[in-house]
Amino acid sequence: MKAIIEENKYVELTYKVIDQKTRQVLTQVEFPLGYVHGVTEILSPRVMDVLEGKSEGDIVEVHIDCNDIYGPRDEALVVIEPIGNVPEAYRKVGTAILMENDNGQTKSFLVTRLDARTVTIDGNNPLCGREVIFKLEIVMVRDATDEEIQYGGKLEAAPDLNNCRAVPV
């Protein structure tokens, strides 16, 4: 009998985030992501709730309005700068820029558009304003060990650094 996802089960899954309107794959996680159910929340609470009761081999689709998670888009977080004001290192679409406000709070912005004269930098989460489908494939379900429950996931062995040598730079 297959183990089902419930509290204190170790679960590994892969997933895709698909734009509901365009069917474009926005994010894809191919290397299994592991967690202990009921201990670690790796995705939105709605996704975690839908996984409850499922088992290895199941494929689950969860429709999510990202406005419920990230709120509506805030156009005040979109900045268009003359290209000359933006350092060369930030002149590539997809580049993340960590910015700090006057109070010392940091926020990640993303370069979303570039043309000959301007660079558009957006502080909204890339999923803001979208309706998406989380398509999850459950790769493994088993009892979690006491250590995994305490840690919230699989414990990886630390690398053995005893035989390492310094490399001059």
Image (spheres, rainbow, N blue to C red):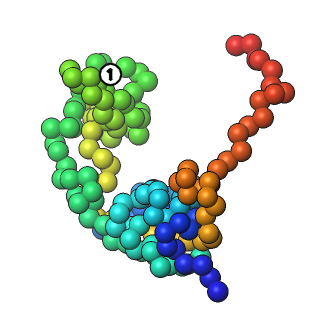
Residue 87, given in percent of the width and then of the height, sits at 37, 20
Q: Is residue 50 visible?
A: yes
The extreme bottom residue here reads: 1
Residue positioned 49% across, 69% down in the render: 7
Vertical side of 127 occupied by 92: above or below: above
Q: Amino acid at mark 1?
A: Val
Residue 138: quadrant of the picture: bottom right
The extreme top residue here reads: 168
Number of callouts in the render?
A: 1
| Residue 144 placement, left or right of 129 | right
Residue 83, given in percent of the width and then of the height, sits at 30, 24
Residue positioned 52% across, 74% down in the render: 5
Which image quarter is the N terminus in? bottom right
| Residue highlighted by disc 1 | 86
Residue positioned 41% across, 40% down in the render: 94
Residue 89, given in percent of the width and then of the height, sits at 43, 24
Residue placed most toward the observer, 85 or 55: 55
Which image quarter is the C terminus in? top right
| Residue 49 placement, left or right of 125 | right
Is label 1 in a helix, a strand or a loop? loop
Residue placed most toward the observer, 12 or 124: 12
Residue 129: quadrant of the picture: bottom left
Vertical side of 77 occupied by 142: above or below: below
Residue placed most toward the observer, 51 or 136: 51
| Residue 18 placement, left or right of 8 | left
Residue positioned 26% across, 64% down in the render: 65
